[in-house]
């Protein structure tokens, strides 16, 4: 039993090493993808990021079709759809991501390369996530958002399949998924520049496979283990807090897959940075930058718990099981990031709105 318990987090370490190495070596960054798209007119990295979600979703749905994964047992399906929590939490996470300069996954990648600023951000994310889960801010979070819970009482819960089932349209589930896959795939590969960029395509494929592997691995252990196993893929908010808790508190509880994944990402990024001679010790330049990282990490940790995940946890992992929260989280996180970047780069949080409404010359 003990050996099986240790195999679960070690599997997470292995997958995390691959994710961390690839993301560090090829500069995969969610905020960077948004920033280049909005300010440089280059959507290549954004298409690569969306490809991660597409590959993860296609493989996850294939695994579910053959009975290897049960999406209805995942946290995203069993948790009620909370419109306020996902929207407000996603907005907070997006703004915090802009203030910090990266998301939770990106902070782990930077930590592997020697960034002490990332260490500050991750500590803030971990502490604020723990507080929002089971601490002082959890009371306010529950009181504010719980009245907006929407329970979909079907076999598939808060997913596309569950929504269609509630309207008696289960027969449309697979056709709808195929339309979504084809539409997103068309948008990704319609750009000739992206089609020619094998590096970005490769990154999208590898990371998407890694996310889907999380569902397969945890589903397998859940079927053979004599202890409860949370079905997980990839998330870098709550598990960052759990990892910190495991480090500083001895409870006797074994680390789970997600904690192993967090550790593996840092290790993989460190290997990539070391082999490329890219390890750089970096600290905050002044108190203003430090305060921005602390406040941003608080928004990311708290918002990530309210939104049930980060840009990877919600927009990739949750989307791979067609959770209804995923598109809402994506929209609110993107809007939050836009507001935060406008504040930092243009001096006003709503500068992008004024620019978009200006008549073309």
Image: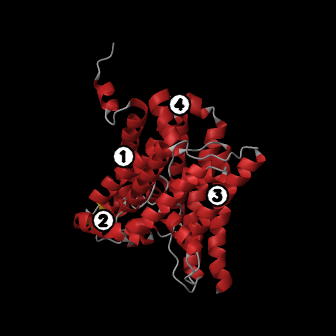
> Is mark 1 in CB contact (under 8 Å) with mark 4?
no
Residue pointed to by mark 1 = 331
Residue 45 position, x and y percent, is 55, 38
> Which mark identifies residue 141?
2
Sequence-first disc among 1 and 4: 4
Residue 296 position, x and y percent, is 43, 50
Which element is circle 1 on? helix
Q: In the depicted view, which residue is nearer to us: 167 or 19? A: 19
Q: Residues within 10 Å of mark 1 (few under 14, many from 20)?
A: some
| Viewer-side label of 2, 1 | 2
Residue 69 position, x and y percent, is 52, 69
Q: In the depicted view, which residue is nearer to us: 15 or 322? A: 15
Which element is circle 3 on? helix
Q: Residue at x 38, y 57 (%)?
A: 303
The answer for how far apart the CA atoms under marks 2 and 3 are is: 30 Å
Residue pointed to by mark 3 = 266
| Viewer-side label of 3, 1 | 3
Q: Residue at x 53, y 55 (%)?
A: 120
The answer for how far apart the CA atoms under marks 4 and 3 are is: 32 Å
The answer for how far apart the CA atoms under marks 1 and 4 are is: 22 Å
Q: In the depicted view, which residue is nearer to us: 340 or 22? A: 340
């Amino acid at each position: 039993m003990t050996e099986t318990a240790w195999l679960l987090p070690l599997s997470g370490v292995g997958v995390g090493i691959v994710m961390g190495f690839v993301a560090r070596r090829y500069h995969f960054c969610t905020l960077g993808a948004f920033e280049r798209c909005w300010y440089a007119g280059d959507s290549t990295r954004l298409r690569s990021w969306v490809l991660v979600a597409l590959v993860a979703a296609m493989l996850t749905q294939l695994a579910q079709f053959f009975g290897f994964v049960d999406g209805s047992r995942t946290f995203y399906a069993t948790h009620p759809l909370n419109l306020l929590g996902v929207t407000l939490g996603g907005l907070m996470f997006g703004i915090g991501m802009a203030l910090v300069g990266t998301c939770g996954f990106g902070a782990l990648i930077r930590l592997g390369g020697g960034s002490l600023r990332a260490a500050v951000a991750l500590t803030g994310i971990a502490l604020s996530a723990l507080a929002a889960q089971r601490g002082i801010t959890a009371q306010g979070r529950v009181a504010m958002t719980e009245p907006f819970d929407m329970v979909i009482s079907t076999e598939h819960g808060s997913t596309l399949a569950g929504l269609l089932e509630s309207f008696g349209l289960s027969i449309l589930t697979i056709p709808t998924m195929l339309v979504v896959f084809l539409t997103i795939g068309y948008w990704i590969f319609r750009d000739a520049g992206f089609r020619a960029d094998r590096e970005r395509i490769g990154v999208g494929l590898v990371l998407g496979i890694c996310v889907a592997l999380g569902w397969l691995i945890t589903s397998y252990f859940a079927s053979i283990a004599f202890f409860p196993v949370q079905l997980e893929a990839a998330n870098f908010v709550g598990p960052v807090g759990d990892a910190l808790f495991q480090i500083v508190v001895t409870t006797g509880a074994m680390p789970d897959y997600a904690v192993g994944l967090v550790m593996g990402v840092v290790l993989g990024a460190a290997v990539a940075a070391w082999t490329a001679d890219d390890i750089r010790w970096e600290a905050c330049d002044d108190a203003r930058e430090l305060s921005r990282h602390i406040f941003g990490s608080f928004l990311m940790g708290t918002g990530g718990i309210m939104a049930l995940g980060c840009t990877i946890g919600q927009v990739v992992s949750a989307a791979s099981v067609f959770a209804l929260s995923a598109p809402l989280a994506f929209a609110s996180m993107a809007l939050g990031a836009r507001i935060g970047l406008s504040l930092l780069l243009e001096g006003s949080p709503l500068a992008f709105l004024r620019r978009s409404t200006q008549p073309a010359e």
